[in-house]
Image: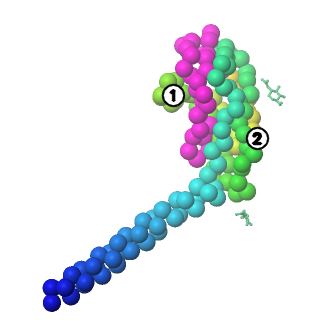
Amino acid sequence: MSSQSSVLTKVFLFFFALFGVFASLAAAAPFAEMERRDVFVPPITYPHTGTVWYKGQRHNVTWDTTNAPVNITNKLGRIMLRKGDITTPVILEDNFDILLGRIEVTVPWVLPDTDYSLVLFGDSGNFSPQFSIQE
Ligand SMILES: *[C@@H]1O[C@H](CO)[C@@H](O)[C@H](O)[C@H]1NC(C)=O
Ligand SMILES: *[C@@H]1O[C@H](CO)[C@@H](O)[C@H](O)[C@H]1NC(C)=O
């Protein structure tokens, strides 16, 4: 009697565990699928470590488009300025085709420092290495 109930408990626990696995697979699948097919987060290739920009200059920010998927949901890009670990509200360029691989920006007038970086947004963002902006 008691061994029978322990078998039932094991069977129950088995199905319970199985259900849990399926539930987590079902929850994870759409996200993994979307990431593989649609989200394109290209790495920034310029500016890089050692780059020095001066206020008011024009520069091509460049990024690598070689691994672009066929269909991208986040076709339009936006470049924002970061300082240290903070993304500032400064938008350098917006609404450009993420597949261009480069876009001209004007260096904003900000306090001279060595810990600026850029974020290229399609869907989620990709950070450049830190570089300098000088007056
Ligand atoms: C950006 O790149 C384009 C294409 O190579 C070039 O025509 C343009 O002069 C560049 N702009 C700057 C500021 O270097
Ligand atoms: C890309 O989208 C087009 C048009 O919606 C579709 O016909 C094609 O099958 C898609 N390709 C891939 C690889 O998803």
The structure residue drawn at horizontal position 48% and vertical position 28%, both measured from the top left corner, is 85
State the residue position of label 1. 88
Residue 26 or 88: which is nearer the viewer?
26
Where 89 sits versus 38, above or below?
Answer: above
Q: Quadrant of the C terminus?
A: top right
SS assignment at label 2? helix
In the rendered image, residue 113 lying in the magenta stretch gets the answer: yes
10 Å crowding of disc 2: few (<14), some (14-19), many (20+): few
Q: Which residues are magenta?
A: 107-135
Quarter occupied by residue 45: top right
**Marked residue nearer the N-terminal end (1 or 2):** 1
Q: Which mark is residue 41?
A: none
**Relative side of 92 to 103, left or right:** left
Name the quarter showing ligand 2: bottom right
Q: Is residue 16 visible?
A: yes
Q: Which quadrant: the N terminus?
A: bottom left
The residue lying at 58 percent from left, 62 percent from top is 33
Q: Which is more toward the observer, 7 or 85? A: 7
Percent x, y of residue 34: 58, 59
Which of 3 and 49 lies nearest the eye of the viewer? 3
Residue 95 in view here: no
Disc number for residue 100: 2
The answer to whether 47 is drawn above or below residue 110 in the figure is below
Instruction: Name the element at disc 1.
Output: strand
Judged from this view, the residue extending furthest toward the left is 2
Q: Amino acid at mark 1?
A: Thr
Q: Position of residue 130 (x, y in %)?
A: 58, 24
Which coloring applies here?
Answer: rainbow
Q: Quadrant of residue 107?
A: top right
